Amino acid sequence: MKENKMNRISNLVVKKPKLIILISLLLLIPTLVSYIFTNINYDILTYLPSHLDSVKGEKILEEDFNAGSMTIVLVRTVTDNGGKVSPNTVVKLKNQISEIDHVYNVLWADNLIDSSVPGDILPDDIKNVFYSSNGEYTMMFVSYDDTASSKDVIKAVEKIKKILPDDCYLSGISAMNADTKEMTDRESPIYIAIAVVLAIATMMLTMDSFVTPFILVGVIGIAVVYNLGTNFLTGISYITQSIAAILQLGVTVDYSIFLVNRYNEERRHSATKEEAMSRALNGSFTSLAGSSLTTLFGFLALCFMQLTLGMNIGIVMAKGVIIGVLSVVIILPAFLLVFDDAINRHKHKPFAPNFGKLVAFVTKRKKSFSVLFLIIIIPSLILSMNVKQNYNLNADLPEDSVTAQGTALLKEKFNMTTSHFIIVDDSIPASKLVKMEGEIQNVKGVSSMLAYDMFVGTSIPDSIIPDDVISVVKQNGRQVMLVNSIYEASTDECNSQVEEIENIIHKYTDGDHFGYITGEGALYKDLIETTKVDFTVTSAISIIAVFIVIAVVFKSLSIPFILVLSIEVAIWINQGISTIFGSAIPFIAPTVISCIQLGATVDYAILLTSRFKEELAKGQSRTSAMLKAANESVRSVFQSAMLFFFATFGVYLVCSISIVKSICAMLARGSIISALVIVFFVAPLLLLCEKLIAKTSRGWKSSDVKDEPITAFAVPQKKDDESEEETSFTEFSFSDDDGEDE
């Protein structure tokens, strides 16, 4: 039935290629329009699970206090000539910020005490919160009427930047999101262009026509636009937006190269190009189906992350795989048939290594390479488990950005790096709250604290306090306190501090009251704990899913074990390299890499295995079948790996966003490692275990033909003359001291 479906698709393609091209181009119009209106989320912390106390607290801040997207504005109060900036000048700037659309409130010292009072004679509690120790800077807190990730808040932050004097700076999640958006918008077109150029250049060298690379990149580009254009309903994260096009290029190009190489092979044995394309589509069905399904489930495994960023990446990329496969089996063949004459007119000898001798060398020493594979399993696993992870999103920002400089100044001038928000039930007795506040102030690393009762006292009724002061700290039966910390969010010190404050809050709140701690510190602490669980769960799911797919495709129990273990070792080696060099990788990288590298590069192993099975079915000996399968497959694997490498490495070279930069670096490295593992380990393992595979696989036709001595075995090679329809054979001979394993 599957073959019949494939036959119907191939018949449609070969009969109406021009119509297919026309429809594919017309569909670009609505998808491009929808992409323009796609919402992009720049706040990773919003993807944390909703049941966490830190997330519940953040929601209260956003809904009741409009403080979930708070920005800290640092204003210099000393002029270059040593004079002091008057409080009225600061108030004027504050009023300007207040008038910006979507700014909800601006909190400064004048909210608590008259602005005519000089900063140096303010009460210590107020001075410590709003002024640096030497009085050089003062800070105000800006809140908005929407979340930190909203377009409106990001626009408001950008407007604040424009009205600030040169010696003023910003800090906070909303400011960081604005800087991230600016970097992403500026860099994305650059590294996508670099990826495309490098991909075309690589294909120019490794393929036999100057036209084919443009067709492949064009078709993949169509698939990318389709994919990104269908995200407008759900929106995407900036990380997804940054890597989606590159990943889809790297993944889809595998299928494209497999089909092109199979089409070129069938052209030598077919009367017409239409017949060749039909045979190529039907002949490559197993490889395409198996490869796409493993990649699909590798991405879908990300959907099981508690951090819903994984679901965001997983759904977008799973959708990209489906669209990519459909484009390869429908749109790509149409372009190849229509432009067949142009492809043939611009043929050239590909600049690619001759893998024949390498294949023969590895095959000859199958036992040695299999033993080597077993030896490296444990060390690579240990190294991968000890890789350091980085959870600091501020590291994405360039040092010269307004937000990075503001964060540095907070630490330097205010002895403050992170702000915690404590939300408690307002019905808790004031005397009890004051005791709690006192304990929190004494927690190690707390530099200052801003709380309602600390300034108005416990005996002054709310009725005589100005509404603008009360509204800042009290809303809907809840009260908020600000705690400033010297520790950087995501560090062990900050995590311990958050835990200690949590214990204090729980001490003073009972069953009738609630208390939450939120802010960057608490959110990052939960992020660390969440992603540790996510890595274990998603890795297990992706391995099981890919195992099942391969088992179904090959109707085998042994093949999926060999292929999955091989790629897992490649993943461990990839992560272990970071451990060896002492490099910290972004927190999301292990989870993403483990799923993507497994799903995307196991394609190489499936291609080799399916071709090995096909050659055995033709009645060739085991060695002959593997030599032919490896020789034909390694070219495609080499092309795909190099394309994936250069596309992702190009992003790594120019991207300033550390998460995207690190993921692309590991994907580039992983593609090469996986390709090497396929050549040096999978091929020998398949050949060595062929008898076992035959016993544990349905439909596997093991050969009864006796293996010829590999010391004088003919390996099929293409002739230099591309016009030839036949295949020549190159004989490789080895001396007796070559290390024969037989």
Image: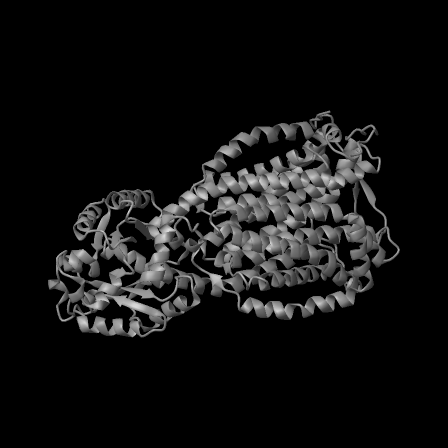
Left or right of 165 in this view: 707: right
Q: How many marks?
A: 0
Q: Quadrant of residue 737?
A: top right
Q: Is residue 600 visible?
A: no
Quadrant of the image containing the C terminus: top right
Q: Residue furthest left?
A: 121
Q: In terms of image quadrants, where is residue 158? A: bottom left
- The answer to whether residue 201 is left or right of residue 302 is right
Describe residue 147's horizontal placement relative to residue 454 as left or right: right
Which residue is found at the position 23% from the left and 68% from the top?
468
Q: Residue at x 36, y 55 (%)?
A: 58
* Res 250 seen here: yes
- In this orientation, which residue lies closer to the viewer: 316 or 470? 470
Q: Residue furthest right?
A: 271
Q: Residue furthest front?
A: 512
State which quadrant residue 294 falls in: top right
Q: Position of residue 562 (x, y in %)?
A: 65, 34
Reply above or below: 202 against 555: below
Residue 560 lies, with reference to residue 437, above or below; the image says above
Of 687 and 454, which appears nearest the observer?
454
Where is residue 667 drawn, in percent x and y? 55, 48
Q: Position of residue 545 (x, y in %)?
A: 61, 41
